[in-house]
Amino acid sequence: MSARRMLLLGPPGAGKGTQALRLAAKLGIPQISTGDMLREAVAAGTDVGRQAQGYMDRGELVPDAVVIGVAEERLSQGDAESGFVLDGFPRTAAQAEALDALLARMGTNLERCVALVADEDSLVARLLGRAQIEGRSDDSEETIRTRMGVYRAQTAPLVDYYRKRGILGEVDGLGSIEEVAKRIEEALS
Ligand code: ADP
């Protein structure tokens, strides 16, 4: 497993966050989650948080300009020089292009994209279960359906974008955390 600059792609509930954290800890590189950073911004009441909150509560995407700013600032920090696991970014073609441009300016590139694959009904069931445990404000059934639709329309096309680039690995996202982690490591090796 030699790649150190990678991203995890997949629909809501596919386990990106869990797997990204695990992978980042194992490799000693930061996990960079725009969802986590935006939730922190909302909690802290910053400008970014105020701009993002309504979209997040409705399950819609936060505008590209806001998210790209957040991601660029984080990727420019020193600890990302040794590598990173991106989680939940990019989610649109414009974000993917901005990421490419930023990495090019930094004299580097993305080495690998791992796409977690899972059927929508299993994911909705999983998210409804998580909603009861964590009480995240965007985990109502209606919002979950919106997030799935947004994924299909805006983010799923990125799978092809990275496939064409020859850096895509597709992994079955259903199974235990350990099983999925093992598949991801195989896809990265
Ligand atoms: P999930 O993958 O379960 O939907 P995330 O924590 O990744 O959860 O994202 C939660 C919400 O944060 C999204 O529904 C969206 O409103 C916002 N968000 C996170 N990342 C992005 C992004 N890259 N572009 C636009 N909005 C984003």
Image (spheres, grey):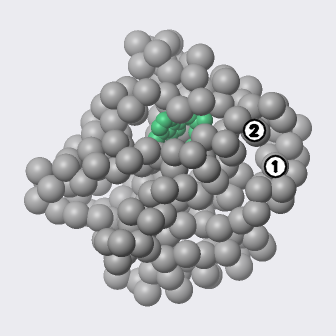
Image side of residue 96 versus residue 51, left or right: left
Q: Quadrant of residue 76?
A: top left
Read off the residue under disc 1. Answer: 124
Disc assigned to residue 93 = none
How far, Cα to Cα, is label 2 from label 1? 7 Å
Q: Position of residue 55 (x, y in %)?
A: 57, 23
Work out whether residue 112 or residue 149 is closer to the camera in this orientation and state it: 149
Labels 2 and 1: the sequence-earlier one: 1
In what element is the residue under mark 2?
A: helix
Instruction: Assign ligand 1 to one image quadrant.
Output: top right
Q: Position of residue 95 (x, y in %)?
A: 35, 43
Q: Position of residue 66 (x, y in %)?
A: 37, 26
Whether the residues at callouts 2 and 1 have beta carbons within 8 Å, the answer is yes
Read off the residue under disc 2. Answer: 144
- Residue 8 visible to the viewer: no
Q: Amino acid at mark 2?
A: Ile
Work out whether residue 16 or residue 142 is closer to the camera in this orientation and state it: 142
**Looking at the image, residue 72 lies above or below residue 184:** above
Q: Quadrant of residue 174?
A: bottom right
Q: Residues within 10 Å of mark 1 (few under 14, many from 20)?
A: some
Q: Position of residue 107 (x, y in %)?
A: 11, 59
Q: How many marks?
A: 2
